[in-house]
Image (tube, rainbow, N blue to C red):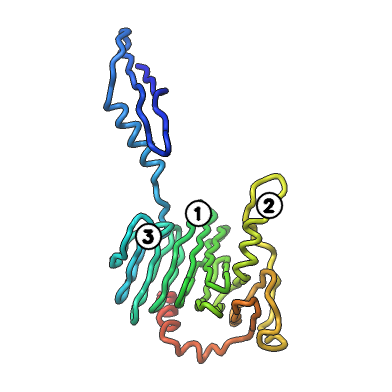
Amino acid sequence: MVIDYSGICTCNGILVYKRLYLDDNEGNIVKNSSIFLIIFLILFSFGFAETQFGKITLPLGTVEVLANSGESWERAKPNQPVNVGDVIRTQAKSRCEIKLVGGGKIRIGENSELELNEANVKPMEKNFQANLTKGNAWVSAKAAFGEKKNVSVRTPTAVAAIRGTTYRTKAGEEESSVLVYEGKVDVNQPQNVEKEETAPKPGGKPKFKLAPPTEIDAPTQVAGPYELTLDEWISLVDGMQINLRKDGKYYMFKFDQESDAQDEFVQWNKELDAQ
């Protein structure tokens, strides 16, 4: 049995059927619409498949999702899958936990908005990117042995990229902050990252590559607040905080962990991480 589907083509993104015949092995050529329907459904499903970012495991209060293919905000439900392109927001006195595909979690506090930009999951390498346009986010994503896991959260003034660790970031239009609780976090300005993403690489298309960061081995305060401009990746260890302004000036210091531990959002996250 031979199928001739050479008559199927696309025109302006729409499948067009010209001819589809079936050879019944006796020399008789007959039209078969059911075969066309099967092929159409297969091609349609491949063209419009969505990439899952994770699922909302703990919506508390008023948590809403704007689906990539949707037109209005919908109330989030427990264990609701969310995909790349979706946006999650919380109202006052509300919180949300998102469990990432392949392990790891992002939690957002009240009055926050998180855009889910990328989820690239392979057996031993997992990359996630999200954009925190406002509010607070807590990232807890430890990598398994031999695994590479990067969870990058961008704010209006900072980009934080981790390699399996725990950190918190607060987004603001004029200034954002990143606090490291465990491991290391690489931080840079959004405009610097955009230059790296679009810079042409020899012998190929432009490709993002994380530059070797400048490590801060000891939690030492810089000479003065906002006297230096961040023009490359810098790596923070646990106990460090960086405040990065819109103009690129930054202030890095060891934050008061006892005072920070009194924050209700911090307490909630630490309790969940300990479970």
Taking 210 as reference, is 181 above or below it? below
Numbered tag placed on residue 49 in the rendering: none
Q: What x and y, as percent, mark residue 181?
A: 54, 78
Task: Residue at 57% x, 67% y: name it.
Answer: 161
Name the residue at the top extreme: 27
* Amino acid found under the numbered disc labelled 3: Val
Indicate the secondary structure of the residue bearing disc 1: strand
| Label 2, residues with CA under 10 Å away: few <14, some 14-19, many ≥20 | few
The answer to whether residue 78 is visible is no
Disc 1 target residue: 120
Task: Residue at 28% x, 22% y: name it.
Answer: 32
* Amino acid found under the numbered disc labelled 1: Asn
Q: Quadrant of residue 101?
A: bottom left
Image quarter where the N terminus lies is top left
Numbered tag placed on residue 82 in the rendering: 3
Taking 231 as reference, is 1 above or below it? above
* Amino acid found under the numbered disc labelled 2: Pro
| Label 1, residues with CA under 10 Å away: few <14, some 14-19, many ≥20 | some
Please tell me which of labels 3 and 1 falls first in the chain.
3
Relative side of 78 to 132, left or right: left
Please tell me which of labels 1 and 2 falls first in the chain.
1
Disc 2 target residue: 200
